[in-house]
Image (cartoon, rainbow, N blue to C red):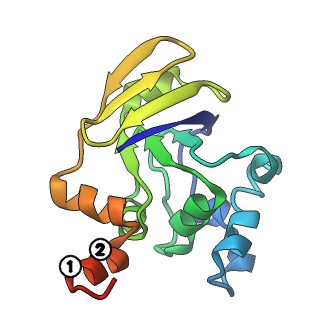
Amino acid sequence: MALRGRVHRYGDHVNTDVIIPARYLNTTDVAELAAHCMEDLDPDFGREVRPGDMLVAGENFGCGSSREHAPVALKGAGIGCVIAASFARIFFRNAINVGLPVLVCAEAVADARTGDEMTVDLAGGHIRNLTQGRDYLAEPFPDFLQQIIAAGGLVECTRRRLGLA
């Protein structure tokens, strides 16, 4: 699965309360969550993000609460992939469970700037910063995780395996 989008670059320790502020956790409506995604950290995010864009961040992305609302909000806002130097463990798994691709690649993060164009090949873990003409390699997901992401998340993947979709 190949993705292409513009970079939205953030720093270290972006927590789930910044990804989707707690005041919006009384809903599971994806459009509502997407409308408020990142608003306390970057008020322009909702107006600037386009489908397929990449969110690039430093260490410990998704730290904080274990809520699934955070990756749901990012996916709903149109983020095609999150690339970080490292992820909080629960966020990483929640992202996969909702079908949001996440890759660990400190080198790509170190070079990326907001507005850069990137492509990501999830199957091979290849990241290319088109703006800077640089290539990176992240650890690709095993087949079973790629299947979950391709299906749109764990629930949909399970439905397909059980013949319910």
Q: Nearer the viewer, residue 98 or 157?
A: 157
The type of residue carrying mark 1 is: Arg
Residue 36 x, y percent position in the rendering: 75, 65
Residue 148 x, y percent position in the rendering: 29, 65
Q: Can residue 36 be seen in this view?
A: no
Q: In which quarter of the image is residue 1?
A: top left
Q: Decide if residue 136 is on the left or right side of residue 98.
A: left
Marks 1 and 2 sit apart, C-alpha to C-alpha, by 6 Å
Where is 41 relative to 163, above or below?
Answer: above
Q: Nearer the viewer, residue 119 or 135?
A: 119
Tell me the tag on residue 44: none
Where is 156 relative to 83, above or below?
Answer: below
Mark 1: few, some, or many residues within 10 Å (few <14, many ≥20)? few
Q: Which of 38 and 161 is in front in this view?
A: 161
Task: Tell me the element at label 1.
Answer: helix
Which residue appears farthest toward the left when viewing the image?
143
Task: From the image, tell me which residue sits under label 1.
Answer: 161
The type of residue carrying mark 2 is: Cys
Task: From the image, tell me which residue sits under label 2.
Answer: 157
Where is 67 relative to 41, above or below?
Answer: below
Q: Decide if residue 126 is on the left or right side of residue 47.
A: left
